[in-house]
Amino acid sequence: MSVAAQQQPGIKAATGAQREWRPPSYWPFVLPALIVVLAVIVFPWVFTIWMSLHEWKVGSPTVFVGLANYLRMPNDPRFVEAVWHTLVYTLLSVALPLIFGTLAAVVFHQKFPLRGFLRGIFIMPMMATPVAIALVWTMMFHPQLGVLNYLLSLVGLPAQLWVFHPATVIPSLVMVETWQWTPLVMLIVLGGLAAIPTEPYESALIDGASFWQMFRYITLPLITPFLFIAGMIRMIDALKSFDIIFAITQGGPGSASETINLYLYSVAFVYYDIGYGSAIALVFFVLIVVLAAVMLAMRQRMHWNEAGGGA
Amino acid sequence: MKNILATRRSVLAGAAATGALGLSGFPVRAEVNWKKYAGTKLEVILAKGPRGDNLQKNIKEFTDLTGIQVESEQIPEQQQRQKAVIELASGKPSFDVIHLSYHVQKRQFEKAGWLADISGFMKDPNLTAPDLVESDFSAAGLQYAKNDKGQMLSLPWSVDYFILYYNKEIFAKKGVAVPKTFDEMVAAAEKLTDPKEGTFGFVGRGLRNANMTLWTNFFLNYGGEFLDAKGNILTDGPEAIEATKLYQRLLTKVAPPGVSGFNWMESMASFTQGRSAMWIDGVGWAPPLEDPAASRVVGKVGYTVVPAGPKGQFSATYGDGIGIAAASKNKEAAYLLCQWAVSKAQGARLLQTGGGVPFRNSVLNDEGVRSGVKLPKEWLQSVIDSAKISKLGLPVIIPVAEFRDLVGAGVTATLSGADPATELKKAHEQFRPILERSEKA
């Protein structure tokens, strides 16, 4: 039909004009999603940026201060400390669940009686509510009445202060985090292990490889992509961690376990300093994006190495 | 000042006259028209705790009296504060009546103008029962409820005095007398500490922020004042350093391990388990201490005032009030509710269960009310004695939370060996610009 239409010069012009005039037919389909994205993602971000450029204390008028809120951060000792706490906390609570989760996955990948049942038990911490967990652990950490010090005393070790001392508070919190999230890493790695074919192991056995050698040279390289996924999920979760820290220590003793997230909460919702809080939120977001990008880049490089190794 | 006195006197005279008329059988000239706002619906936002419970439990009486319907919700303290501030700042709060913590919110609420002035209502005999007069509230209550122009912005509801709880059994076993001064308290605590048995001389809040309520009681008794005449904060001076040294000494030498993470809850746990001989905290913890289901020290607890420092003897005082949102459209009905909440009947219930201590002298001094108190008589005596030495336990400023966090963190740091003077100086340097900014805004 269009071929016929094009043969007539007058109509051809009209068609050309029509093509220019026709409103793009995809807009009605795009619009709902666009509105949602604008309202739910873009607007809050633009508003946060706008707030971060203002001195805005709830109850007082808003004043434009430019970048003053950002310049306050490097001179704010609590913020600088919070960044360190966040990085240490994140590093530990990514590394430990990865190590223990991988070990657990290797164990649970073996076939033994009651495996399914034990797997079920093992992933239970992951299903519990973080605040409930935190309250239970708080009692266990209690230096006088807690069960942890009792267990230590059974094996003749001196009592510890756990979350009640600035030097041990972050490792103790990481212990809770590790206990809760090791099962997640295990599940991801188990998925990876299930996908590995048996042939490499068979040929390795014929070549006389030890168990460790098989793990190091076959299992580990093949599950590395899964470890990266698990690591990335853990990293983002650990950076954002709030519930466990808040419920157990509220950032204490002093401010020894105050992470950026906790400090941000205090600034915005306890001190009602919305402007400065928004600026911290933005910096925090940039930090997460940068760290995630680094992880992704590393994963990409590993991928190339793997391909190179295979070729 | 003269004006206030005159009003107070005339109000008193009026009250006396009304009372006399009532007694003599004459019809009372002006009486509160409780039913005038029948049918109104009020929204109330409460902080979770015994005051909220007491209001909710008996609210039917208020509805029967006034015909006013009340919708109330109890929210945990921290969240209630946040919700209230955000809603009030929006200009359209969802509530008419608010339960506020004076020691945290007074200055913030005044400066933002969030509360309705009820001075006029209090003078109106159609709205105010004759027994509700300003002079019936304790000095601390009035200090909290009035702004610097002398307007009443809320009704003082319940006061919290810091007192000394002690374990009579441990004291008797070691033959130690109840301390009257800080020096005696330190000496007693050292004698009572026996790490091998797991008993310690003293326990108290070590957790940042929470610890400030205890620390300030030491600070006050060393002669400390929070602000100078120009409104500068004074928490790095010699009084503060001495107070911190005492705090450090008690909490590191004679307190249970891990005390730097203790809030009132952990402190109470240690005390109710009989592990700590002395505990300084708010007066409201007597009910759990005397509850056989929660405590091993029932009947063994002594209650007395906080020992004297070298420069005075005070009971650090905190409190909450009940006020009306300035944006509320039902201010008169809301006022009737506030009045009922602090009434003698409600106050008596609060005191008798140990859920709070009314600011009103007419409740505290009433023999009938006193005899109904279910807690030990010593507890009531410590309340009455503390009222005489009451002094506000936190500075009346807007950034109270920052103050408690920053100075509190410094004070907690001394528990891991940091030097008091250095830590206070550091906290001071951090806090001063925050205070200046808040007062300037």
Image (cartoon, coloured by chain):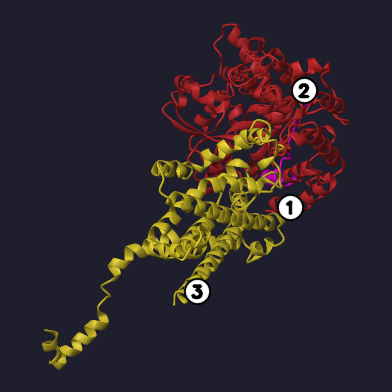
Relative to residue A79, is residue B71 depicted above or below? Answer: above
Label 1 secondary element = helix
Q: Is residue B14 above or below residue B151?
A: above
Q: Position of residue B414 (x, y in %)?
A: 79, 43
Circle 1 chain: B
Q: Amino acid at mark 1?
A: Glu
Q: Is residue A176 above or below residue A301?
A: above
| Numbered disc 3: secondary structure | helix
**Residue B372 visible:** yes
Distance in Å between CA atoms under marks 3 and 1: 58 Å
**Residue type indicated by callout 3:** Asn
Say which colour chain B has.
Answer: red
Q: Which residues are magenta?
A: B388-407
- Kindly identify which residue carries mark 1: B436
The answer to which quarter of the image holds residue B413 is: top right
Please identify, in this view, whether the residue under mark 3 or under mark 1 is nearer the observer. Answer: 3
* Quarter of the figure with the C terminus of chain A: bottom left
Chain letter of the yellow region = A
Q: Chain of mark 3?
A: A
Disc number at residue A305?
A: 3
Q: Name the element at disc 2.
A: strand
CA neighbours of label 3 inside 10 A, class few (<14), some (14 to 19), many (20+): few
The residue shown at (65%, 30%) is A145
Q: Residues within 10 Å of mark 2 (few under 14, many from 20)?
A: many
Picture coordinates of residue B103, whole percent (x, y): 68, 36
